[in-house]
Image (tube, rainbow, N blue to C red):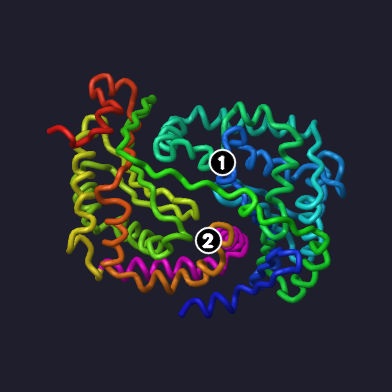
Amino acid sequence: GQRAELERSIRQTTLPNGLQVIVVQNHGVPLATVEIDVRNGSFTQDSGYDGLSHLYEHMFFRADSDYPEPDAFEARAAQLGAVFNGSTEEERVNYYLTLPSDSVDAALQLMASAVIKPLFRADELDHERAVVIGEYDRDQSQPGFAFQRAMGHALWDGAWPRKDPLGRRASILETTPAQMREIQHRYYVPNNSALIVTGDVEPQRIFGAAARIFGEWKRAPDPFKEWPIPQIPPLRHDTGVVVTAPISSAVVMFQWQGPSASEDPAATYAADVFSDVLNQPGSRLQQRLVDSGLFESLAVNYYTLNHVGPITISGVTSPEHVRKAITALEQEISAFADPGYFSSAELEPVKRQRIAGTMFGLERASGFAHQIGFWWAVTGLDYYLGYVDAMARETVPDLQRYARRYIVGKPHVRGVLIDTQANRSVRLTAAELSHWGAHP
């Protein structure tokens, strides 16, 4: 199977302090990527802390004990010829430097300083807070932003802060250095982190350098035993969302609460094959809804998360067709688990594409570091190593089981983003969408 090939490529060890070190060598170009992934992100946020994991990410590249001056980290990275960045998602935060491989030890040193000894200077926090608020305001001016947030509130209800990396303006504006320190002590600990090095490197050398450079980082209690993540409350009934904005077409989006990777891993494999099959141009869904002219485009997606990942079906239609499009989409959804909706002939090509995509990922060192980091944080590396083989075994009954358990007849959020002017005549309301199909 593919697992053996991945295991040969992905070398790993765990340091005495619990830091997992993962190395993938690829000598194609003389570059290396040094990445740190931390199991942190919006899923650790209570209200009042929403947006703070993301603000922490902005503070990561600021002053630390080894580089105490503002911009000293950036100056050192530039000296090494490195590009660096970070990102915050629901269930992981990552930081990475890509640079000439002969400077990889210096990059490890620079990363260690940033992760182990941050200063959280008040002047830098003021500056980064303004940067994050700027991002927030920029996003807020996009029509899709308000729509996606309204959908998120409806789907996750009280758990929304745990699904919202950007957070609330108020929480961001009130952040203190003490709150940053608290996040550091809870989550930025070696036994909750992974160091991933990919590219033109030798695994044994990296293991040795990592032990030397990161060995002083002190192990801490498991944050998820100390501060368990509460269960995501299930969606109890259908909900409607209507957002108006000056846009030319109408966006229809349906969302369900899907599987959790740790509780129902089998469903997550089925989910990916299910989405891929329905997104194929020749699928029954595309023929009936897109080729018929009801939708301009339509996409199905499951986003893998450990604490309930969302299932999304979204499409673009015209305001005057919106009711007809929703009716047709609901009709298709109700047939997803019917015998004959999928044929086994449809499954094979999409599985082959997924396998090729996964194995091809090995060729792109920096992208591969981010990919491994995501799976390490969200599902654990073992899930990733077994992914290709497990997915290759999926059958039509697996897809039907997934559809029955998570989609067909299950509560979902029906959302529409529609032109403000057009909705004066269309008159679509959230109440109508909540009770769709209840009255003839």
Q: Main secondary structure of the magenta part?
A: helix
Point 53% across, 32% down: residue? 139
Of mark 2 and mark 1, the one earlier in the sequence is 1
Label 1 near label 2: C-beta < 8 Å? no
User: 106 and 387: which one is in front?
Assistant: 387
Question: Badge 2 local density, few (<14 within 10 Å), some, or many (20+)?
Answer: some
Element under disc 2 = loop
Q: Is residue 124 left or right of residue 161?
A: right
- Which image quadrant is residue 125 in? top right
Which residue appears at 61% of the width and 26% of the height?
170
Q: Quadrant of the C terminus?
A: top left
Indicate the amino acid at tag 1: Pro
Give the vertical position of 151 relative to 377 (above or below): above
The magenta segment is 346-375
Q: Is residue 118 left or right of residue 222?
A: right
Residue at image mark 1:
165
Q: Residue at x 50, y 70 (%)?
A: 359
Q: Position of residue 435 (x, y in %)?
A: 24, 33
Badge 1 element: loop
Above-or-below relation of 136 to 84: above
> Disc 2 vs disc 1: which is toward the camera?
2
Badge 1 crowding class, 10 Å Cα cut-off, few under 14, some 14 to 19, many 20 or more, is many
Residue 226's x, y, as percent? 65, 51
Amino acid of disc 2: Thr
Q: Which mark is residue 379?
A: 2
* Percent x, y of residue 212: 83, 67
Where is 416 relative to 306, above or below?
above
